[in-house]
Image (cartoon, helix red, strand yellow):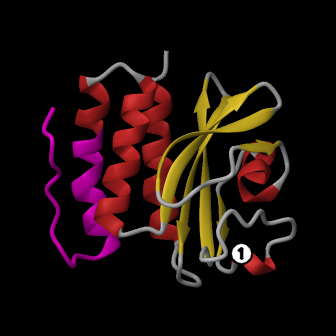
Amino acid sequence: MSESIQITKGAEKAILYDELLPQIHGVLQSETDLIANLANVSAILKEAFQFFWVGFYLVQGEELVLGPFQGSLACTRIKKGRGVCGKSWETRQIILVPDVNLFPGHIACSSLSRSEMVVPIFKNNEVVGVLDVDSDQLDDFNQTDAHYLEKLAVMIGQTLK
C-alpha cells in the first residue's frame, strides 16, 4: 500500500473522486483490518476534500457506535432513527442535508457543522454502518458526492467479512 494519495489539487469533485476511488480500493484490498481501513478512508477523504468532519458509525445492537473518524470530538452512540445518521440507518438511504439546523432531530455534535451527508454501508443486505461527512459550509454536498460516496460505501461493504 502506498502511504500517500495522488490527486489533482483544485480539480472538480467528480475528477477528485475518480482519482481517489481506485486508490482507496487499493488501500482496502491491501489490509484486512476494518478499523485500519476505515481510519485510512476517513483520512483520505478529509485530506482530499477538506471536509469539516468525516467518519464512520458502526451498528452494534440497537445503536450506531462511533468508529474511526477525522475531525473534532464526536457523538459516541446514536439510536436508530435519531439524527441524520440514525435516520439513514433506519431508512437505509443516503441523506443529504443542506442545512443541519433545518433537519428535524439533528444531533449537534459540533455547532460548526452546517451541512451533512450520511451514506449507509451494507453487508448481506443489512446496514452495518454509515459514512458520515460534515461541512462547515451550508449546502456543501450534492448528487456528485452522493454518487461517489455510495460507490465508496459499496466498496467498503464488499471488503467486510
- The residue furthest top is 161
Residue 36 occupies which quadrant of the picture? top left
Q: Residue at x 29, y 63 (%)?
A: 48
Q: Position of residue 109 (x, y in %)?
A: 68, 62
Q: Which residues are magenta?
A: 1-24
Amino acid type, callout 1:
Val
Q: State the residue at coordinates (60%, 33%).
A: 122
Residue appearing at x 35%, y 68% in the figure: 49
Say left or right for 151 vs 89.
left
**Residue in the foreground of this view, choosing between 144 and 40:** 40
Residue 137, x across and y down, in percent: 53, 83
**Which one is nearer the viewer's eye here, 112 or 132?**
112
Give the class, few, some or many, for how many residues have Cα within 10 Å of label 1's Cα (few <14, many ≥20).
many
Q: Is residue 153 left or right of residue 60?
A: left
Q: Secondary structure at mark 1?
A: helix
At a point 64% along the width and 78% down the height, the residue shown is 98
